[in-house]
Amino acid sequence: MRTRAFSIVAILLGATVFAPFIPSLAAQESYQRRASTAATDTLPLSLSDAVARTDRIGEEVQVARANLYATGAQATVARAAGLPQLRISASENRTVASARGQAVGAVFNQPYSYAATLNASQSLFQGGRIINGIRAARAATGASAQDLAETRSLMSLQTQIAYINALFTHRLVQIQEGNLELASAQLKQAEQFEKAGRMSRYDVLRARVALANIEPLVLQAREDAEVASLELKRLANIKPSQPLLLTTSIDSAVIENVLASVDTATGPENRPALASAQFNARARELGVSIARAATLPTITFNFNSGYGAYPVNGDIFPPGRGVFSEVSCAAGSTPDKICKAQNGGWFSDRSFGFTVSIPVFDGLLTKGNIDLAGAQSRIAKEQLAQTRENVFNDVERAKADLSRARAQYGAQQQNVAEAKEAYGLAALRFARGMATQLEVSDAQLALTTAQTNQARSIYDVYIAAVSLAQTQGRPLPLPSTDNGPNQSTGGAIADR
């Protein structure tokens, strides 16, 4: 009995002691389930996939496509002015009281009348307004097409920059976390040496301060990586809460392939922005001719063909084909008079003619339109010259950036190897008591700086090469294959 009572008390005490931890354990299991679900929902995203998403569903590209569609519709409207216009109309009228029938005669007093007409018109001469309008619409459509190409190229560049920046910031997280691990190991070693009497309290304090100084850098690197991922998700139209796995890595082989595709001798002649400005200038120049066409006469041909019916004898609907037949004349008519009447059916009605319109005075409206079109044409020409200067400057600036990035990239490859060797020697000297904590910290800082500079150099040379292609109006290079995550070597930028 005493043993049983002791067991019950132990169970109650255990339940009382461990009860506060039960919710925490349940919450931890729930968190693990959510983490597992998030891992399965992670979206693998390569660099080419990100560019394709931006090009397919990006808002900026969709707006440019809509503008192209709108200018194409305007071109259709411009062409319609030069084509024949056909219109069919039908009418039915009920006359309650006819002044003409009362004043002239009952023949004009039919209560119901019907008409069906086919109208055709063709502009023969509009002073060049139609043909120039068509040419201007085509030029505007060409400008919109070039704007779409420029937008697609620019968004591809921005997406690549965002993707590479995400890789770069994640690489910085790896570097800072590795730096933190080294600092932690150095602190443990320094504390062990202090206990063994081989190191002073000063060196231990320096190791602790170095570790504390690195922790904010790790947090900042993680925050920068999160911000870079959000920017990539924005451009690729991915939900901010969607976890990503970046599957493309940029290593030395990728850099060499990209640099092999660079053409430093090409100018911006194929740049869509320049072609768009040229199309706009042409459209505005044609706008002057369109405005001047208002000072010339216009000639239009019109043709009408139809049928009309005027039911008689109180009929509501026409009986059929209209005919005239002899009827008895009214009393008192001469014997030789022949009287006829229509049966209320359908009679043909056809006519054609030419309309000539000569402008005389429109309150200076035409003059104002000509002056406005001329001013817009001059503005478009100046914008073309400005665009030409800007794109040439963009190319030269991109070439200079690429030259600097290539030089920096070449210098940093050897620098990391030397920094690793220097840190290894400093750590070995420190372990043998031949170096101070200060020397190890300096070597560690130099290694972190070298790794960061190497990652930055890879980022810079890739973006410089892509930017040069974009300013030249050439297809932007993309890595031919995806290396997959966590497969980079050396100083490659890769997602964790």
Image (cartoon, rainbow, N blue to C red):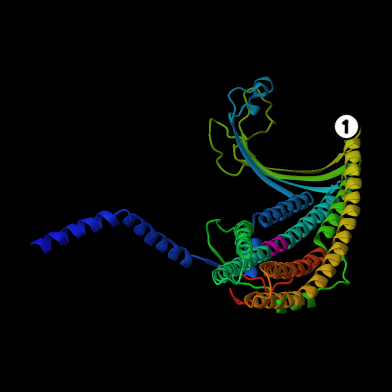
Residue plotted at (91% across, 43% down): 374
Along the line of sight, the residue nearer the viewer: 132 or 267: 267
Residue that protrudes farthest toward the left in the picture? 1
Q: Is residue 406 visible?
A: yes
Q: Residues within 10 Å of mark 1 (few under 14, many from 20)?
A: few
Q: Which residues are magenta?
A: 156-162
Which SS does the magenta portion mostly show?
Answer: helix
User: Left of 279 or right of it: where is 194?
Assistant: left
Q: Is residue 157 magenta?
A: yes
Q: Position of residue 179 (x, y in %)?
A: 63, 67
Classify residue 362 by image quadrant: top right
Which amino acid, mark 1? Asp
Decide: is 453 above or below 366: below
In the image, 208 versus 369, the foreground residue is 208
In this view, the residue in front, 156 or 305, is: 156
Of helix, strand and loop, which one carries label 1? loop
Indicate the position of residue 42 as horizontal and vertical percent values. 51, 66
> Would residue 52 be seen by someone viewing this image from the given angle?
no
Residue corresponding to mark 1? 362
x, y percent for residue 409 = 78, 72
| Front one among 232 and 361 | 232
Q: What is the quadrant of residue 338 in the picture?
A: top right
Placement of 131 over or under 416, stated as above or below: above
Q: Examine the image and state in which quarter residue 489 appears.
A: bottom right
Q: Is residue 65 above or below residue 194?
A: above
Q: Position of residue 267 (x, y in %)?
A: 88, 67
